[in-house]
């Protein structure tokens, strides 16, 4: 049966983990996969998570099945964290949330729902977008089309071009947006642009599908969802895929949620029953542990305050590193990278050539995604000067050999 199968190329992002792991250079630097790191290069378990886990260990009475929608408390608390307690959508009972295996599970569940509700709907994704959006949504059978998003020359959002392209979308198509901390370019929509997109979605009958993987990593836990909340207050229907991988550091516990907003509570319930029937046929039920941890933290005032402080520490470290990288690159003679300080979240493109990226890996053991996306959190006191000098060197070599 398997004799005619060929080996797949490694995943463009996850493949970097093993390449980095196999590199024996003691100076190696991992700017690849999007996990938060502290200054020592570790991705520690948050203290609030450890405390919640200790409570769970003591209190948990059973490991019996929890059901396809997951943990009720988690779903309720996530919904409030995303939409805010006073959002009109909640007052109108127009939203429901289910637990999913990570943000990926939420994206897949959302795509399954769309396929059941409107087979043939196209999904419009930003150019560029997270590399895994394409296989994830594509494997659910959705046709994927791109709208222009990042102007890599001027390092800004190409908003006019984005709108012009989205005017080609047909009624019932889906508009995938990054809630905050755009992956991979780090350039986020401002509130005025969210407002324009809300009107566009309304006029053209597009379904917004917001991927919220970094709540708290941009400007703040509340600030990062201001655009999404504005959108939800304007449109009749919408989906939000949310991940707890980064802000709770629960990467391997696969913790996320899908929120469905519909015209009324009856339609929400019907939609949720469809999603649960679809996911029953894929993963049956989501894993419990991460969601139980999140529910424990969000429902306890002390743990919640501790977690919020930990998120603020991670956010501040990333933002500081952005400024320091700009300065350090300028001092090393690499040129003007000031746009990195204007972007937010874990990622930015360096905008350097594929040859420079290959040289950084080959000669300096510095790893980043082939698109030149770096994970800013992989920088540290120890490596920021080394990385900046290496970038300056490869950019100089590349200029001398006539490549940009
Ligand atoms: C990333 O973009 O690096 C992360 O979201 C990890 C992943 O699964 O790709």
Image (cartoon, helix red, strand yellow):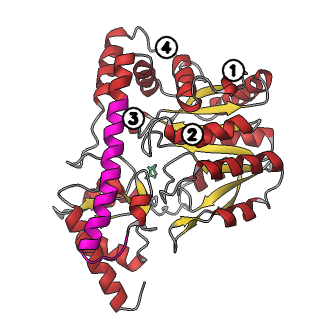
Q: Is residue 308 visible?
A: yes
Tell me if residue 305 comes above or below residue 234 in the rendering.
Answer: above
Viewer-side label of 3, 4: 3
Mark pair 2, 1: CA separation? 18 Å
Asked whether residue 53 is drawn in magenta, I would say: no
Q: Which mark is residue 91?
A: 1
Viewer-side label of 4, 1: 1
Residue at horizontal 19 percent and vertical 62 percent from the top:
24
Tell me if residue 63 comes above or below residue 234 in the rendering.
Answer: above
The residue that mark 3 highlights is 250
Residue 128 picture location, percent across and down: 56, 62
Q: Earlier in the sequence, mark 1 or mark 3?
A: 1
Q: Earlier in the sequence, mark 3 or mark 4?
A: 4
Mark pair 4, 1: CA separation? 33 Å
Does residue 302 appear to the left or right of 371 in the view shown?
left
Q: Earlier in the sequence, mark 3 or mark 2?
A: 2
Q: Earlier in the sequence, mark 4 or mark 1?
A: 4
Tell me if residue 361 comes above or below residue 246 in the rendering.
Answer: below
The residue that mark 2 highlights is 226
Does residue 149 appear to the left or right of 141 in the view shown?
left
Circle 2 SS class: helix
Q: Which mark is residue 249?
A: none
Q: Residue furthest front?
A: 192
The residue that mark 4 highlights is 64
Residue 366 picture location, percent across and down: 28, 66
Circle 4 SS class: loop
How crowded is the residue under tag 4: few (<14 C-alpha within 10 Å), some, or many (20+)? few
Mark pair 2, 4: CA separation? 38 Å
Asked whether residue 332 is drawn in magenta, I would say: yes
């Amino acid at each position: 049966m398997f004799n005619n199968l060929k080996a797949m190329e490694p995943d463009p992002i996850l493949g970097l983990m093993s390449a980095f792991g196999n590199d024996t250079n003691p100076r190696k630097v991992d700017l690849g996969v999007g996990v938060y790191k502290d200054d020592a290069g570790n991705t520690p378990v948050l203290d609030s998570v450890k405390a919640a886990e200790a409570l769970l260990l003591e209190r948990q009475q059973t490991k019996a099945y929890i059901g396809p929608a997951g943990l009720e408390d988690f779903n309720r608390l996530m919904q409030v964290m995303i939409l805010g307690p006073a959002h009109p959508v909640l007052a109108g009972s127009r939203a429901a949330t289910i637990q999913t295996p990570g943000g990926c599970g939420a994206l897949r569940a959302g795509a399954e729902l769309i396929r059941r509700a409107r087979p043939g709907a196209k999904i419009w994704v930003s150019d560029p977008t997270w590399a895994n959006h394409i296989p994830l949504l594509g494997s659910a059978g959705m046709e994927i089309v791109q709208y222009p998003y990042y102007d890599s020359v001027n390092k800004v959002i190409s908003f006019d071009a984005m709108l012009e392209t989205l005017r080609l979308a047909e009624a019932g198509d889906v508009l995938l947006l990054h809630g905050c901390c755009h992956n991979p370019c780090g350039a986020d929509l401002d509130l005025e642009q969210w407002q324009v997109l809300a009107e566009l979605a309304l006029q053209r009958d597009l379904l917004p599908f917001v991927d919220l993987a970094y709540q708290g990593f941009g400007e703040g836990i509340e600030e990062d969802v201001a655009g999404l909340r504005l959108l939800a207050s304007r449109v009749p229907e919408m989906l939000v895929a949310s991940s707890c991988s980064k802000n709770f550091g629960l990467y391997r516990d696969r913790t996320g949620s899908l929120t469905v907003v519909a015209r009324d509570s009856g339609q929400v319930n019907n939609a949720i029953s469809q999603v649960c029937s679809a996911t029953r046929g894929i993963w049956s039920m989501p894993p419990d542990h991460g969601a139980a941890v999140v529910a424990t933290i969000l429902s306890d005032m002390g743990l919640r305050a501790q977690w919020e402080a930990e998120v603020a520490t991670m956010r501040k470290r990333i933002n500081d590193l952005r400024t320091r990288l700009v300065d350090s690159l300028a001092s090393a003679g690499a040129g003007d990278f000031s746009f990195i300080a204007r972007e937010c979240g874990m990622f930015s493109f360096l905008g350097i050539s594929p040859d420079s990226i290959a040289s950084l890996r080959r000669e300096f053991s510095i790893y980043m995604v082939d698109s030149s996306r770096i994970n800013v959190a992989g920088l540290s006191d120890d490596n920021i000067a080394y990385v900046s000098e290496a970038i300056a060197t490869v950019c100089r070599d590349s200029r001398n050999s006539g490549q940009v």
